[in-house]
Amino acid sequence: MYTLVYSINNTKSPETVYVNLTNSCTNKCIFCLREQKDDVCGADMWHDDNYTLEDIITQFKSFMPTPKEVVFCGYGEPFLRREMMKEFCKYLRANYPDVKIRVNTNGHANAIFKTNIAEEFKGLIDAVSVSLNSSDSDEYDKICLPKIKNAHDEVKKFIKACVDSGIDTTATVVTGFDKIHHIDIQKCEEIAKSLGAKFRNREFITSGY
C-alpha cells in the first residue's frame, strides 16, 4: 500500500501526522521536495489517488496513541481532493474532536473550483498554511510555475478568504533555496499582515524535513 498517512520522525507515536491525499498540483515549485526525491523519511510518496476513505483511516489508526495534529500535506495540492479531505475531516471531528486539523496549500483552491472553499471548510479545519512565496506576481511565476492565471493574486484572495472565515491563517515563503531569486521578506510579511494573516519564513532544507 502506498503512503497516505506518514510522520517525519520515523515513529509510530508522533504528535503530528501528515496526509498525502494526491500527487496532483497546480504548481511546480522549483524548491519542492518532490522535485528532489521520491520519499519522506523512507515513505514512498507517489500514488495514483486510487484509494478509499477507509484506506486513510486504517493508516491513521496505525499511529498510536492518537496524534495531536493532522496536517494535509504531501506530494500534491490537498484541496484537489476536496471531497475526500472533507470526509476525513468529518471523520476526525466525529471520532477525535481534540485533534487539530491543518491544511498546507498553494492557495489556488478558490480559483480552481470557482467557489469559496474556505467557507466550505469552516468548522472542519482549524488552520491553513498558504504558500505566498513571493511579494509580486512575476517572481511568483518564476518560482512556482503555476498552471492557473493570475496565480499570485488568487493566492492573496484565498488568504483573505480564509481569514474572513475565521480559520487560523499563516502565509509562508521559502527562502535560501538558490541565489537567483530574490524574495522580499519584509514585503511578503507586509502583504500577509494586510490580509489579516500570520507570516512565516520557512528556511529551505535540502532533505525537506
Image (cartoon, rainbow, N blue to C red):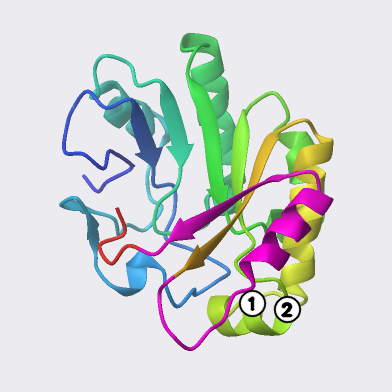
The foreground one among 195 and 162 is: 195
Foreground residue among 77 and 81:
77
Query: Which residue bears the numbered disc 1?
Result: 140
Q: Amino acid at mark 2?
A: Ser
Asked if residue 110 shows in the view, the reply is no
Q: Please give left or right for residue 142 compared with residue 179 in the image.
A: right
Residue at 51% in and 23% down? 100
Residues packed near mark 2 inside 10 Å, few (<14), some (14 to 19) or many (20 plus): some
Mark 2 and mark 1: span between their CA atoms?
A: 5 Å
Q: Which residue is disc 2 drawn over?
A: 137
Closest to the observer, 129 or 77: 129
In the figure, 85 relative to 23: above or below?
Answer: above
Residue 127: percent from left, percent from top: 61, 34
Quarter of the figure with residue 39 = bottom left
Q: Residue at x 72, y 71 (%)?
A: 151
Residue 158 locus on image (x, y percent): 76, 53
Which stretch is magenta? Answer: 176-204
**Is residue 65 shown above or below 142?**
above
Would you place residue 103 above or below residue 146 in this image?
A: above
Q: Is residue 185 magenta?
A: yes
Q: Which mark is residue 181?
A: none
Dot 1, crowdedness within 10 Å: few (<14), some or many (≥20)?
A: many
For residue 69, side relative to residue 40 (left or right) = right
> Is residue 156 visible to us here?
yes
Residue at the image point whose x is 48% and y is 89% from the top: 180
